[in-house]
Image (cartoon, rainbow, N blue to C red):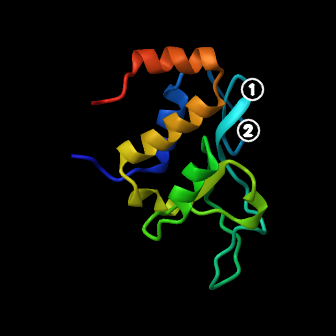
Amino acid sequence: MSRPARVEDVHEIAASMPHVTVSGDNPVYQVGGKSFVFFRNPRPDAVDPATGERYADVIVFWVPTEADKLSLVQDPASPFFTTPHFDGHLSVLVRAGRLGELSREELAEVIQDAWLYRASQRRAQAWLSAHPPAK
C-alpha cells in the first residue's frame, strides 16, 4: 500500500535519477545542466490568499507539455497549482505542506516525468529501457 509523500521523498527520488547534480541552499536538481525540480524562495506571485503571506515552501516540477500542466493544475483535488508568473512555462508548483495529498508513487511519477522531459534523448531512452512501464 502506498504512503503519503513527504519532502524527503522529493530529495530522495530526484537525487536517485541518473546524471543528477544538486546545487544551491534551496536545492535545484538538474540533469545535463537543466533543472527539473527546484525549491523556490518565497516570491510575491505565490501567496496565502487569506493572509497575503508569501509561501515559503513552494517546489517546482517541470512537465512535458501544457496538457500535462493543465491536467495537474485544473483538477480541484490536486495540490498542484500555477501562478501568472509561470504562464507559458512548462512547470507546476506544489507547497511542501500539501505533498501528503499525493502518494509517494504519484510523486515519483511526477519527478521521473520531469527528469525525462529535461534529460537528453539518449539518457531518457536509456532510463526508459531500464524501467519499462508496468503493463
The one of 112 and 23 positioned closer to us in this rendering = 112
Q: Earlier in the sequence, mark 2 or mark 1?
A: 2
| Lateral position of residue 36 relative to residue 108, left or right | right
Q: What's the residue at 47%, 34% (across, down)? A: 13
* Residue at horizontal 66 percent and vertical 44 percent from the top: 38
Residue that protrudes farthest toward the bottom in the picture? 50
- Give coordinates of residue 75: x percent, y percent: 47, 65
Identify the residue position indicated by label 2 in the image: 24
Picture coordinates of residue 113 (x, y %)? 52, 37
Task: Please name the residue that numbered disc 1 is placed on.
Answer: 33
Q: Amino acid at mark 1?
A: Gly
16 vs 109: above or below: above
Mark-to-mark CA distance, 2 and 1: 13 Å
Question: In the image, 114: left or right of 54?
Answer: left
Which sits in the foreground, 102 or 74? 74
- Image quarter for residue 132? top left
Report the mark closest to the observer, 2 or 1.
1
Task: Decide: few, some or many residues near mark 2? Use Cα within 10 Å; few <14, some 14-19, many ≥20.
Answer: few
Q: Position of residue 79 (x, y in %)?
A: 49, 63
Q: Is residue 80 above or below residue 65?
A: below
